[in-house]
Structures are given as structure tokens and as C-alpha cells.
Amino acid sequence: MPTASALNYLRRALTSLVLISSSGLAFDLELASGDFQRTPICSDVTDFDFRIHVDADLAPGVYNNPPLIAASYRVSGTLAPGTPSGFPAFALERMIDGAQFYAQGSSLSFEISPTAALSDGLQVAELVGAGVLLMFNGREIDTGRFHPALLELRADGIGRIQNSNNMPSLNPLQAVDFGEEYITDLNFDPGNLTLVKKPGGRGDGGSSSLSPVALLWLAGILLLWPGSRRSQR
């Protein structure tokens, strides 16, 4: 029998295939904990990865809550005593479509420079802005989760990942403010940290060659596989 981690990886891969196949105009923002030097400030949360399927061409311009096909990310670690959740540790994994991402209160923003050379992908140094260059806010209102992530990257090679807030929550016992569960400072080289490994779009073969029958088969596996509907806080 495959291990739980192998099954989880397979579900993530199949989800990506199904979602990406739905659009030929898309690019993926990808980040992982191994891209950074990590310094825990509150709790010990240093393991994470993000993959955000943006439903647009990769091109210079402002991306303020751009249309998304899906957002998937994972963050885990041990927690200091006395956090609002009261958990000793957590392993949060979210795989949601773009409409649900924004409906729950999440947001995404960044701006690509007019002078960005995108033929080799997109590096942090090719983003522009005042202060924070990229912000992913996984904020969730009234989902009962304490640990959705807020990730920020700055032009000076400093960033941060921490828990977002979920206020105003309808349940005061489930309310949490920014950084009350975990905070980890990040350091990186803006010129070498790649956000998009290769450009998407019409001319890049972004659309899938999978047939509709194959896509339906893959989607069926995702729906019927044991544990596919399981979620964690």
C-alpha cells in the first residue's frame, strides 16, 4: 500500500493537472521554505510551500487580487504554549479554487516591472512597489482555522511568514490576530529567488494535451480517494 505522504502527493499532482488543464492562459507562482534562510520569532514554523495558479498571462503590470484558477499551500510546525489555538503543533494544507480563495477573505498582490525580462521566468528583483513587493494573505473568516498563512516579501531581501488574522470571527473562541500563533522571519536574495519558473500563456504550450475523458478520470480519483476531503487546521 502507498504511504499517506505518497497518496497526499498524488492527490496534489492530480489536482494540479486538472486545474491547469482548464486554462491555457496561466502561470504558477511557487515558493518553498528551502528558498529562504528562516529565523523563528514566535513558535517554530519553518516548513512551508506555496503554489498559486494565476489565470492570466505573465506580463508586466499590477496584479491586485488577480483571477486565480486555484491556490494550494502547506505550512506546518510546533507552537509555543499559550497560543489562541492551544495546539502543540499543526499541519495545515489548503487546496482551493480561486473563487473560494477570495470569498473566504484571502488576497494576493504584486506588481511586475515594465523592464522585467520574463523569458527566464520571474524573480523577486523584477517586482516593484513600496515596502512589500509580494503579499499572499490566506486570511479565512469563520472557517474555524487558526493557522492560514500571511507571507510577505520585500525588496531588501527580508520577508516574513506568520499566521493571518480571522477577525471579525463570529466565534470569539476561534479568533486569532496576526502572528499570535507563529512568526518566522525570512531572508533571501531577490535576484536569485525565482517566483515563476517559466512563463505561461498562449505561445508556451500552457494548455494541457490531456483528453476530456482523462481529465474526468483524474477528477474522479480525487473525489473518491480516501481522505481526499479531509482538512486540518
Image (cartoon, rainbow, N blue to C red):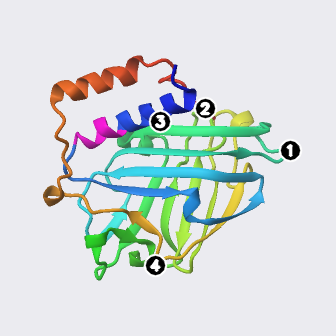
Q: Earlier in the sequence, mark 3 or mark 2?
A: 3
Crowd class of label 4 (few under 14; some 14 to 19; many from 20; radius 10 Å): few
Among the 4 quarters of the image, the one containing residue 86: top right
Total marks drawn?
Answer: 4
Q: Earlier in the sequence, mark 4 or mark 2?
A: 4
Q: Earlier in the sequence, mark 1 or mark 3?
A: 3
Crowd class of label 2 (few under 14; some 14 to 19; many from 20; radius 10 Å): few
Q: Which residue is mark 3?
A: 9
Mark-to-mark CA distance, 3 and 2: 16 Å
Secondary structure under badge 4? loop
Question: Magenta segment, which residues?
Answer: 16-22
Is 197 positioned to the left or the right of 179 in the image? left
Q: Is residue 88 above or below residue 195?
A: above
Mark-to-mark CA distance, 4 and 2: 35 Å
Q: Which residue is mark 4?
A: 191
Mark 1 or 3, which is nearer the eye? 3
Mark 3 or 4, which is nearer the eye? 3
Is label 1 in contact with label 4 (beta carbons under 8 Å)?
A: no
Q: Earlier in the sequence, mark 2 or mark 1?
A: 1
Which residue is drawn at the image coordinates 13% and 59% (left, top)? 203
Q: Is residue 133 above or below residue 96?
A: below
Residue type at mark 2?
A: Gln
Q: Position of residue 187 (x, y in %)?
A: 62, 71
Q: Position of residue 12 (x, y in %)?
A: 43, 36
Q: Earlier in the sequence, mark 1 or mark 4?
A: 1
Which residue is drawn at the image coordinates 69% and 41% (left, top)? 175
**Does the rendering let one see residue 142?**
yes
